[in-house]
Image (cartoon, rainbow, N blue to C red):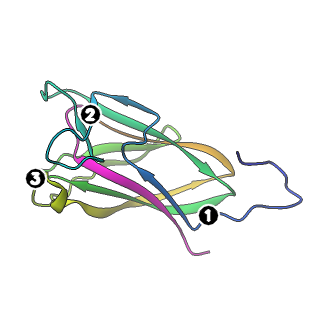
Amino acid sequence: MPTTDTTHPQTPQLLIERKARDFDSSQHIEIGNLPYGADVIHNAPPYAFGPNMVAYKIIFDAAASYDLWIEYAAKVSRSCEIRWNNSLLEDASMRAVTGGWEESFQKWHKIGTVTGGQGIHELQIDRAEPFPHIRAIKLQLKER
């Protein structure tokens, strides 16, 4: 857990990585189980159109700004809302088409920048319908 000791300030992590499957909460999400990749999240059975949501707790060792990247595959555009600490980071993000749903079509996309103090933050991705097939999330420290 992060500390609040200001006499010995912490150094921000250079890279924070999360597998998409390691979410803290979700709605209508399945992990793997189809030919999209064992660690990929996608809409759950009965695979009908319905809302998808996934949320992650992200710990910052120190105050910092990070570039947010998401690795996903999408045969058709499925834009999502992305929230950082309950504030809309970007609407209609993750709209790029990668060429297919399968693992070989997974590509990294820079979503934007997130900023926060030392402690726990929340990243949430949601869409009123199924979202792209997501494999990983990373936050890369911005140069100071």
Q: Residue at x 54, y 70 (%)?
A: 142
Residue at the disc numbered 3: 75
Side of 61 relative to 100 (left or right): right
Q: Residue at x 20, y 36 (%)?
A: 130
Q: Disc 1 vs disc 2: Cβ atoms closer than 8 Å?
A: no
Work out which quarter of the rendered image holds the C terminus and state it: bottom right
Q: Is residue 70 above or below residue 51?
A: below
Residue at the disc numbered 1: 13
Q: From mark 1 to mark 2, how far is it between C-alphas?
A: 30 Å
Q: Residue at x 80, y 48 (%)?
A: 4
Q: Residue at x 23, y 47 (%)?
A: 133
* Residue farthest along the top direction in this orientation: 46
Q: Residues within 10 Å of mark 1 (few under 14, many from 20)?
A: some
Between tags 2 and 3, which lies in front? 2
Q: Magenta segment: does it hold 128?
A: yes
Q: Magenta segment: does it hold 60?
A: no
| Magenta extent | 127-144
Q: Nearer the viewer, residue 9 or 106?
A: 106
Q: Residue 108: where, in percent of width, then height?
A: 30, 64
Q: Residue 106: where, in percent of width, then height?
A: 22, 59
Q: Residues within 10 Å of mark 2 (few under 14, many from 20)?
A: some
Q: Secondary structure at mark 3?
A: loop
Between tags 1 and 2, which lies in front? 2
Q: Earlier in the sequence, mark 1 or mark 2?
A: 1
Q: Residues within 10 Å of mark 3 (few under 14, many from 20)?
A: some
Q: Earlier in the sequence, mark 3 or mark 1?
A: 1
Amino acid beneath label 1: Gln
Q: Secondary structure at mark 2?
A: strand
* Residue farthest along the bottom direction in this orientation: 143
Q: Earlier in the sequence, mark 2 or mark 3?
A: 2
Q: Secondary structure at mark 1?
A: loop
Residue at the disc numbered 2: 30
